[in-house]
Amino acid sequence: MVLIVNEFYDDAGHEDPGHPERPSRTSAVRSAVADLHLGDDLIVAPAREASRAELLAVHEGSYLDELGAFCYDGGGDIDQDTYATYDSWSIAKNAAGAGLAVLEEMRSRNDGVGFVATRPPGHHALSDRAMGFCLLNNVAVAAASLLALGERVLVLDWDVHHGNGTQQIFWNNPDVLYVSTHQSPLFPGTGFAGEVGGWSAIDRTVNIPLPSGATGDALQRALENVASPVIDDFAPTWVLISAGFDAHRADPMAELQLTSGDFSELALLAASFAPRSGRVAMFLEGGYDLDALRASVHATLGAAVGATVVAEPRSNGGPGAEQVARVQQERQAAVDALHSLEATESAP
Amino acid sequence: MDAARIESPPLRAGASSTVARYPAELEAKVELGDGRTLRLRAIRGEDERRLFAFHRRLSAESIYTRYFSFHPELSVDELHHLTHVDYESRLALIVEDGDELIGVARYERYPGTSEAEVAFVVQDDYQRLGLGRRLFAGLAAAARARGITTFRAETLCRNHDMMSVFHHSGFPMTSSVSAGEISVRLSLEPPSDELPSIVPTPKPFGLSWS
């Protein structure tokens, strides 16, 4: 199958010396793609910025104005984690536009696996606020573009952190199913099993928190047992993946113990959630150990396009397997509670 | 009904009234949409009689959703307990219209934890005016300032107004249901600016980045 990636846009201007979310991350990812040696099966979607209208589908206009002005004033620290520079506004708009470009190319070909290799990442960005290294919510902007076409979108987020921004943006949207596996407790402190969606979208959010030390088998089992039935019921027409690679055991940000081989399996599982080929696109989120990032992207994309790649053996035996039943229980209780309220009176 | 249950704590025999600093800074005006101005403040020992009269004015339904039982009168011991608080581990805010008490919100800390049970009741003819939300916001702010990070509440499934207050509080909420009752947990953790960092401590990266 062809791999459709975004044309590289120079992101060197979005840098804060010593900060882990750094330009060498995209270089590592690009080399992982090149090492697949796909030849004509590698398609490049031309770079473009997301328009204001496209961003307004998920972000507040006042926030876009503030962020743009902040950058053009020279930038600085937005919070203790998140920075922006003079160039960040343009780079962030290109990161959001890259996802749109890849989806447009996929739709015109009606085939392929999409991979959006951009930074800064997006899944922590709220409708009105930057946080967690994220300025604009790239995957949400892409999902919104599909919603406008009447599609039903599964956003599968396997970054080691909970994608609080994506969850918030689609909290009450019944046409988006947000599924997240993440280490908990961990930044940003959200993503409990009982968070199942808002009044208009009950059961359209699936959170699977996993303990420190959890291995790939627990994550895989949780997705199969907890998320799969909800996904089947939702019947997505598109699958967008917030593909962070910071759940890798070598990543310095957290303590999950995944290997590149686990990410291969996740890619195959994600493909099984799509109605057919040509409907899965991955968006780079976290991943801060460059070697682990390169190896994981290589293994993930290799599995997704059916290429033969060498990956680390899958991990197993860590804690977390026993948590799956509890997650299921908490979810069901929350869903039942919301439905019982809904039945008592109409929602506020 | 703006009401949720708080477990009646055991009354200690011979417990003396606590001498605690009265938090005058919690006083505020509450303006209703119809132009009336009410007063919000922390409860005081001398509010016993007003609380007694307030409870008598509540409908049976309001009392039931507050106490989960038929509880037509508050006893002298209960009145003393509910009005004599230490403003730290136990704190109640009241809303007054003139001299009449028309709403109460209170929290009670689980000993040795940073969690507290929370409960509200608003007089029937003052319900659905936004007082529940106002009381909750005031109570949450006071609780956070006193080191409480989580509110817990038990409420009846049919108590839609109460759930609405929780939903609109802006605090992350989780809930579970059993036998017609919903257990709610609200995290009062500081918002945004004081969030924990995404980067673990000690930072695994260079020193130059703030």
Image: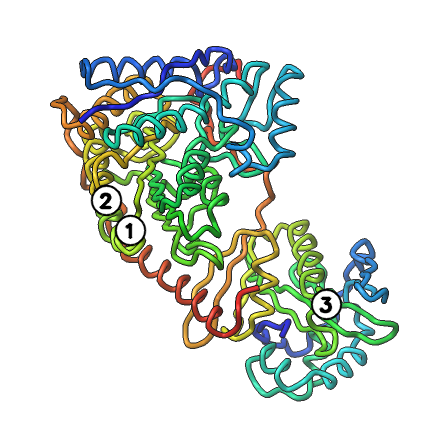
Q: Given contact means CB atoms under 8 Å apart, are the residues at marks 3 and 2 in contact? A: no
Q: Quadrant of residue A156?
A: top left
Q: Amino acid at mark 1?
A: Ala
Kindly identify which residue carries mark 3: B129
Kindly identify which residue carries mark 1: A235
| Disc 2 from disc 1: Cα separation | 8 Å
- Measuring from the top left, give residue A11's x and y in whole percent: 45, 14
Q: Quadrant of residue A243?
A: top left
Image position of A192 (left or right of B102): left
Are both tags, 3 and 1, on one chain?
no
Q: Which of B84 and B30 lies nearest the eye of the viewer?
A: B30
Q: Amino acid at mark 2?
A: Pro
**Residue at point 46% right, 61% down?**
B175
- Locate the N terminus of chain B and report the quarter of the image it occupies: bottom right
**Residue at point 14% right, 28% down?**
A306
- Measuring from the top left, give residue A296's x and y in whole percent: 25, 25
Estimate how packed mark 1 is, as few (under 14), some (14 to 19) or many (20 or more) residues with alpha carbons within 10 Å. some
- Measuring from the top left, give residue B63's x and y in whole percent: 63, 82
Nearer mark to the viewer, of 3 and 1: 1
- Locate the C terminus of chain B and report the quarter of the image it occupies: top right
Are both tags, 3 and 2, on one chain?
no
Q: Amino acid at mark 3?
A: Leu
Q: Given contact means CB atoms under 8 Å apart, are the residues at marks 3 and 1 in contact? A: no
- Which SS class for mark 3? loop
**Residue at point 72% right, 82% down?**
B55
Q: Given contact means CB atoms under 8 Å apart, are the residues at marks 2 and 1 in contact? A: yes
Image position of A247 (left or right of A88): left
Kindly identify which residue carries mark 2: A275
